[in-house]
Structures are given as C-alpha cells and as structure tokens.
Image (cartoon, rainbow, N blue to C red):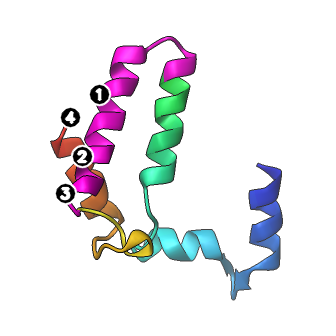
Amino acid sequence: MVPLLTLQERVRFGTSCAVAVYSRSDLANPVAAIWSAVHMLRWLGEHTAADRVETAMLKAIQDGEKAGDIGGSLGTDQVTKAIIDRL
C-alpha cells in the first residue's frame, strides 16, 4: 500500500491521481488484480477456484483478448468480461 500512496502523491493531474485517471478512462489492465486474487484464493486453500480463475485469465490472453499495455486493444471492462465469460 505504501508504494501506491507514494506514487499517487508524486503523479498528480489537477485533483486526480494517475490511478484514478486510468480507472475512469478504461485503460487499466485488470490482469494483475485478478492474478492477485488467484494467489489469495490459493493462500486460503481454495485451489479449485484459483485454478478456474487462472485458467480463464490465461485462456483470454491466449485468445488475444487483452489490454493495450500487453499488445491488445481491449479496455478494462472488455478484458474483465472476456475472463468472466471463460469461467
């Protein structure tokens, strides 16, 4: 949490931080957050659920349904939907 807070303090655009700008513009890649959820599920002992989410996420990426920062053209909502559709 501290590095994010530090980043937010350094990168300001008017009254909005970079994180808020990206989240409002549909440019944020949800894969890192979803992958973090996979690790949390494993830590909680929910290995079947973790495997399902990870498989869906990787399948979406393999099928080319990915955000612009990793070579795709989809926005946050579209990538999230592509992963959910594979669950």
Q: How many residues crowd around disc 1 within 10 Å: few (fewer than 14), some, or many (20 or more)?
A: few
The residue to which callout 4 is attached is: 87
The residue to which callout 2 is attached is: 59
Q: Amino acid at mark 1?
A: Arg
Q: Are marks 1 and 4 in contact (CB under 8 Å)?
A: yes
Q: Earlier in the sequence, mark 1 or mark 4?
A: 1
Depth check, front residue: 60 or 27: 60
Q: Amino acid at mark 3?
A: Asp
Seen at 36% across and 36% down, the residue is 54
Horizontally, is 46 left or right of 86 in the view?
right
Q: Earlier in the sequence, mark 1 or mark 2?
A: 1
Mark in the foreground, 4 or 3: 3
Q: Earlier in the sequence, mark 2 or mark 4?
A: 2
Q: Secondary structure at mark 1?
A: helix
Q: Are marks 2 and 3 in contact (CB under 8 Å)?
A: yes
Seen at 53% across and 30% down, the residue is 39
| Image: 1 above or below 19 | above
Structural distance between the alpha carbons of marks 2 and 3: 6 Å
| Image: 30 above or below 59 | below
Structural distance between the alpha carbons of marks 3 and 1: 16 Å
Horizontally, is 60 left or right of 20 in the view?
left
